[in-house]
Image: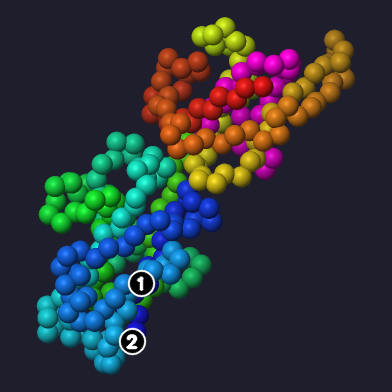
Amino acid sequence: MFTLFSLLLEHGYFADKQWRNAQLQATSTTQFWLNQYQMSLHKDGTTWRLYAHQIAPKTDFLRYLKHSKSIQTLEFWLVQPLSEFVTFTDLPMDWKGCLQFNSANSEPKSTAKGVNLLPINTLVQAQENGLVEHAIAKVIFNINDLMTNEDYQIALSARATQWVYHLIQRGQTRLHHPQLVDKQNEVSFSTPSVYKTQEGETAWLSDSGEFNLPLQQVPQPRFELVDTQQLDSTGAHNISRTVISALPAPRCDQLHFGTQEDLKEVSSSCIQSHMYVYF
């Protein structure tokens, strides 16, 4: 027995990029060849491996498939059960197609052996013959490539959005000079501006400006609301206090397209995550 390929799946949305809920499923034609020539697909964490239960050496077996049986490729569907996949993945918001990955279109990994498969943004129509439910990509392994390389990876990025906080005052706390602070000192939020909600409540609005932040399934709290109060008219003396030590991160269902009608002018193509925080 030997390994024909291993495919590591990574996605920036999931904790530690562990893309565990995706499934690799052979197309009907490929499944026929797997059954015919004693090949089997197995999952280990986020890595899928195709094994061949053969006595002959790996190269001889692959040559036999190609030259004697005219098998040029082994093809699989990458199936993702989460309906929000397009929402939290770095894809066009109106994307309705199916990505394609091909072992002929790859680049070397930067930190380990093997190659990264690069996506081809082909919009495969849903009515394509053989397209399975929830398939988000087709993965094609060329027999020629399997002769020279065994380790592959597919890595997708999480969608990055402009974060917008609405800080709505409902309690006794009064803000004087609020500011959103990044504990990692990487992101600068705009100075909060005050406005009235439709219900007449006082609220403050602040956004991440040019900084787009990735959506995460398990976000790490990094932003806090700090308020500064001047103690005299000269501004020489003031005191700062943390009002909220861990501001919430957005869910993937909190997306909006920024328009000129927003409370602050933003690009019409800007994708925002709006969060409403009550204090």
Which amino acid, mark 1? His
Q: Which residue is mark 1?
A: 42
The first of marks 2 and 1 along the sequence is: 2
Q: Position of residue 99 (x, y in %)?
A: 28, 52
Q: Which residue is mark 2?
A: 1
| Magenta part of the chain | 162-189
Q: CA distance from mark 2 to mark 1?
A: 13 Å
Residue at the image point whose x is 61% and y is 29% from the top: 189
Q: Residue 65, located in which quarter of the rendered image?
A: bottom left
Question: Which numbered marker is on residue 198?
Answer: none
Q: Position of residue 276 (x, y in %)?
A: 56, 24
Q: Position of residue 206 (x, y in %)?
A: 59, 24
User: Is 108 in the magenta?
Assistant: no
Mark 1 neighbour class, 10 Å CA radius: few under 14, some 14 to 19, many 20 or more: few
The number of callouts visible is 2
Q: Residue 77, located in which quarter of the rendered image?
A: bottom left
Residue at the image point whose x is 18% and y is 86% from the top: 64
Residue 167 vertical position relative to residue 208 in the rendered view, above or below: above
Quadrant placement of the C terminus: top right
Q: Is residue 94 left or right of residue 69?
A: right
Camera-side residue of 16 and 199: 199
User: Is 182 in the magenta?
Assistant: yes
Q: Residue furthest top?
A: 200
Mark 1: which secondary structure? strand
Can residue 174 be seen here? The reply is no
